[in-house]
Amino acid sequence: MKRSPLYELTQRLGAVFGPYDGWQLPRRFQSLAQEYDALRQGTVLTDRSHVGRLRLTGKDALDLLHRLSTNDLLSLEPGRARGTVLTTGKGRIVDVVTVVRMPEHLLLLTSPGQQGRVAQWLDTYTFLEECAVQDIGQEMALLSLVGPGAEEALARAAGPASVLPRAGEARGVTLGAAEAVVVRTDPLGLSGYDLLAPWEQAVAVWQALAAPGTANALPAGLEALETARIENGVGRYGREYGEAVNPLEGGLRRLISFTKGCYTGQEVVARLNTYDKVQRKLVGVVLENKLRIAAGKRPRLLVDGQEVGYLTSWARPPRRQRWLALGYLRRAHAKVRAQVQVEADGVSFPARVASLPFRR
Amino acid sequence: MAVQEKTKPQPLTIHISPKAAEHVKHFARLEGKEEEIGLRVGVKGGGCSGLTYVLSMEAEPRPDDKIIEENGIRIFVDKKSYVFLAGTILEYSDGLNGRGFEFHNPRAKTTCGCGTSFSV
């Protein structure tokens, strides 16, 4: 189990740790309700070191990514970041990544724990191109500053002379005695930033952002973020996204360019789109009962006794009566307010389809 | 008793048809290059099915290239591409509906609609 440079600090702050894709990271600090409220109304700071971080060097790196993924990357300017989906020849999802164009190299933020898979995928498709991939997960830490107050919090921590990155931008920002690469990724459907700090400076960056009276961000664990992710209707690899799913089903249309030309899986994605052949949709489901299911299993969705889909993520946000879930439903049934039955570990109860993001 | 000598199986290699070879020489002349120019044949990642064929003229091979000579053409292939191209015949399709250079690759499982991309 890997530990980030923020381990001791977060432990002193009362963090309860959990295993996340090979890392020991804070699951929660004081109370889920308090962290969730801060996330929705204020600003929180989270250790997200399980997000994959790869550095790509070589003059052909951007071109290679452009040929292997759905979005237009050749038009990505230095200092900008863009999401894209790496797809197989059959148009299925290898990973959903964010490409950050730095002056001398590219940064690739992968789904948690997916950096090895993505590096291997890129290597398989590298022939004579100049492109080298390096896992910098132990070189740079990743913290996220999110919530409606994130911009103000960052501005106060960075000082009046700083220029902050706007949506889709990446900038070096000085925070206290440290320097971090700050990317305005608005992750998980939240407003805010992913900050990459050199390993030895991670603590200084955290302290600059958590400082009472200046930035004043509240430490939050990954449980609060996961709850918000589901409520925001944002998918994640291993749950909603994977090699059994294509990006159109997964609601990732905004990361697909239909005019950029050839990329791996392009024909399948284009055909599905042109002939309107997407068979199922990612939807929200509001559950009437609490969901109890064994780990690794997926609740089924039934209509008139027929299986029409399954659930992929579920949570009960604080201050909500009902459990919320994300799942895939066959098109014909994927209508808002449609009634379905959830079946999990022999227990069956009703639920209804809701639009995403869930209304609050 | 004479020991029956087994015929060794032909090693899979990359072939270039006489017609394709003629066209390479023709293109070399058009570009003012030497007729003895080398032909780089290779594979590139990306392209709708996953892999795309690469064809270019180069004066010299790279240190790790495999060199194949046929029909008066020196073919250069990098080792990684060779894995995907062994057994391939480079043809030239001309005439009214000709498509130019064509890779006939016995290893290709799927090809894309326009024929430039394949997977194994």
Image (cartoon, coloured by chain):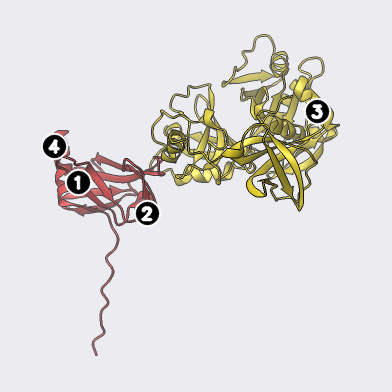
Q: Mark 3 and mark 1: span between their CA atoms? A: 67 Å
A323 in relation to A77, above or below:
below
Callout 4 crowding tier (Cα within 10 Å): few <14, some 14–19, many ≥20: few
Q: What is the chain letter for disc 3?
A: A
Same chain? Circles 3 and 1: no
Q: Amino acid at mark 4?
A: Arg
What residue does disc 4 label? B29
Same chain? Circles 2 and 1: yes
Instruction: State which mark lies toward you, 2 or 1.
Output: 1
Same chain? Circles 2 and 3: no
Q: Mark 2 and mark 1: span between their CA atoms? A: 22 Å
What residue does disc 2 label? B83
Q: Mark 2 and mark 4: span between their CA atoms? A: 31 Å
What residue does disc 1 label? B92
Q: Please identify the quadrant where the C terminus of chain A is shown.
A: top right
A3 in relation to B72, above or below:
above
Q: Taking A173 as reference, is A81 left or right?
A: left
Q: Amino acid at mark 3?
A: Glu
Callout 1 crowding tier (Cα within 10 Å): few <14, some 14–19, many ≥20: many
What residue does disc 3 label? A35
Residue A228 appears in which quarter of the rendering? Answer: top right
Residue at image location 66% in from the left, 18% down from the top: A174
Hue used for the chain lettered A: yellow
Q: Nearer the viewer, residue A250 or A159?
A: A250
Q: Amino acid at mark 1?
A: Tyr
